[in-house]
Image: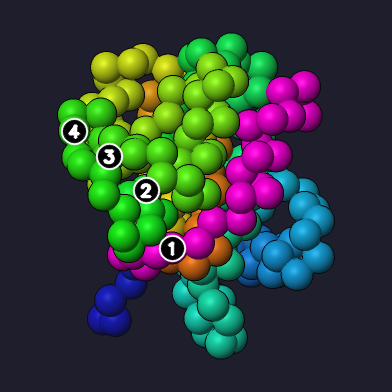
């Protein structure tokens, strides 16, 4: 007598298959919208895109790789979407409740600053990083130049901000925004134009747009 599945298992099996196809369809549609948004800098159905990135990130990235596209586009669009969502609350937060974190790799190779419990201590040599720190602090921000994520977590616990602007490579910014979400902070991030261990590059015009425009977006 041939083996036969119980009807309940057939139903469960079909449900699993249909659910998998449903998720795949969402991932495909999300991937198309992400690629379009990256190319045109226009967000179409941002809530749907953010859902697909958050829930189906691995599958969406796999689809990008499958068609020969750089899967970092997924992270780029995800950061832009989360910035768009959080930026209004960031700017509505009193400036003295906002922290800014710069990575130490933005320093010049000849920088003579020393590491302290509050991060790298700027020597005001006149570099772009030092000027940005001084300008932001004159507005009321607390600004830190840090060597790693452990410093960020400790300084957040110490200073108890309501909002954070983080600068770093894509991986660091993504992790920082996710940390802010866990801590119920309004987190926004700026990705370096050129990443690396030393002499990295930031679009300073974008940085000043973030900190100087304090009207709700």
Tell me the residue at 53%/39% (across/down).
132
Is any atom of residue 19 visible in this view? no
Residues tagged 1 and 4 counted as in contact (Cβ below 8 A): no
Residues tagged 3 and 4 counted as in contact (Cβ below 8 A): yes
x and y percent of residue 191 in the render?
52, 54
Q: Sequence order check: which comes first, mark 2 or mark 1? A: 2
Which one is in front in this view, the residue at disc 4 or the one at disc 2? 4
Q: Sequence order check: which comes first, mark 1 or mark 4? A: 4
**Marker disc for residue 103:** 2
Residue 210 belongs to the span the image colors magenta: yes
Quadrant location of the N terminus in the rendered image: bottom left
x and y percent of residue 115 in the render?
19, 40
x and y percent of residue 27 in the render?
59, 63
The magenta region covers 196-217
What's the distance in space between the residues labelled 2 and 3, CA to CA?
A: 9 Å
Q: Return the residue at label 4.
A: 116
């Amino acid at each position: 007598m041939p083996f036969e599945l119980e009807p309940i298992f057939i139903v469960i099996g079909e449900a699993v298959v249909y659910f998998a196809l449903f998720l795949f369809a969402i991932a495909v549609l999300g991937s198309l919208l992400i690629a379009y948004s990256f190319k045109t800098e226009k967000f179409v159905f941002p809530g749907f895109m953010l859902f697909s990135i958050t829930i189906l990130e691995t599958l969406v990235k796999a689809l990008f790789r499958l068609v020969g596209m750089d899967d970092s586009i997924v992270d780029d669009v995800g950061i832009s979407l989360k910035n768009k969502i959080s930026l209004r609350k960031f700017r509505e937060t009193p400036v003295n409740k906002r922290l800014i974190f710069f990575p130490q790799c933005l320093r010049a190779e000849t920088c003579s600053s020393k590491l302290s419990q509050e991060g790298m201590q700027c020597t005001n040599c006149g570099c772009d990083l030092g000027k940005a720190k001084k300008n932001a602090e004159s507005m009321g921000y607390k600004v830190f130049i840090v060597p790693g994520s452990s410093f960020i977590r400790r300084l957040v616990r110490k200073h108890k901000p309501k909002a954070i602007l983080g600068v770093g490579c894509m991986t660091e910014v993504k992790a920082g925004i996710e940390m802010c979400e866990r801590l119920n902070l309004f987190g926004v991030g700026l990705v370096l134009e050129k990443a690396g261990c030393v002499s990295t590059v930031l679009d300073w015009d974008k940085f000043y747009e973030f900190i100087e425009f304090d009207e709700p977006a």
